[in-house]
Image (tube, grey):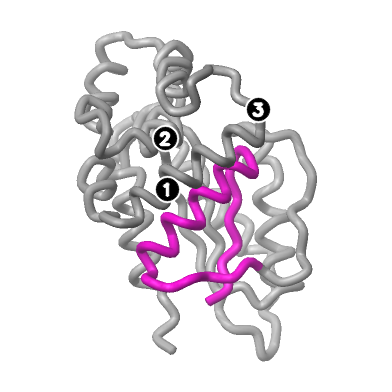
């Protein structure tokens, strides 16, 4: 199965691929000979390039699935219908996918390209602490955020816990993120239970869209 992964850093993308493969129970392939476009990372950077990434994946690769994962940072973590929904990054990315598909012409002979979105709350490092620190869960962050917790401060704490520094180099980040992702892959259900919205919904989508062949 050919899976394209887009996130806020190449380190995040490496870890996310391991997690997606654990859900799929197979080793996915990146689109061959298709390097990631260079762009300024972070939520705004990813948001800006999603239409182009989706179009490139559809028109110029045989990718089966495009996975986008972003940090929630200080934004709401919800799939509901409340006013928070409009502020949710999950909602915004899904809306952007829908809008982009309206401008894509069907390619003859092209297998369907599916898309899915994950939201790490408040950052991917929270997922990487799953199974190590029971206090780091999606529900705990939602509660803390409503109580006024600072997302930047919490993210710095999470980075310190995962990397030993809140300002890791890309090599440090990639090494530790993939190490922890491999650990999580041994019991991917634990990550779904601890982060049922941001990771659980992604896992359900990936399973539903798995190539039956």
| Residue 58 on image: x %, y % | 67, 70
What residue sits right under mark 2 in the picture?
88
| Quadrant of the image occupied by residue 19 | bottom left
Q: Is residue 153 above or below residue 128?
A: above
Is 192 part of what is drawn in magenta?
no
Characterize the local packing of mark 1: few (<14), some (14-19) or many (20 or more) Cα atoms within 10 angstroms.
many
Given residues 95 and 26, the one toward you in this image is 26
| In-image side of 163 versus 133 (left or right) | right
Q: Identify the disc placed on residue 80.
A: none
What residue sits right under mark 1 in the picture?
181
Given residues 166 and 175, the one toward you in this image is 175
Q: Helix, strand or loop at disc 2?
A: loop
Cα separation between marks 1 and 2: 25 Å
Cα separation between marks 3 and 1: 18 Å
The residue drawn where x is 40% and y is 28% is 122
| Residue 60 on image: x %, y % | 76, 72
Tag count: 3
The residue drawn where x is 50% and y is 37% is 176
Given residues 90 and 204, the one toward you in this image is 204
């Amino acid at each position: 199965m050919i899976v394209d992964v887009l996130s806020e850093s190449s380190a995040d993308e490496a870890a996310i691929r391991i997690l997606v493969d654990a859900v799929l129970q197979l080793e996915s392939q990146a689109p061959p000979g298709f390097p990631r476009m260079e762009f300024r990372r972070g939520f705004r950077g990813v948001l800006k390039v999603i239409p182009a990434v989706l179009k490139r994946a559809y028109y110029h690769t045989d990718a089966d699935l495009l996975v986008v994962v972003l940090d929630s940072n200080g934004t709401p973590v919800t799939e509901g219908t409340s006013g928070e929904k409009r502020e949710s990054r999950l909602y915004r990315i899904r809306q952007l996918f829908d809008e982009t598909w309206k401008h894509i012409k069907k390619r003859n002979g092209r297998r369907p390209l599916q898309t899915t979105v994950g939201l790490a709350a408040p950052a991917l490092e929270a997922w990487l602490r799953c199974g190590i620190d029971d206090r780091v869960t999606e529900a705990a962050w939602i509660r803390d955020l409503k109580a006024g917790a600072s997302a930047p401060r919490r993210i710095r704490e999470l980075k310190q816990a995962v990397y030993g520094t809140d300002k890791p180099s890309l090599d440090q980040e990639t090494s530790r993120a993939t190490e922890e992702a491999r650990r999580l892959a041994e019991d991917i259900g634990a990550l779904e239970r601890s982060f049922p919205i941001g990771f659980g919904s992604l896992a359900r989508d990936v399973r539903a869209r798995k190539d039956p062949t």
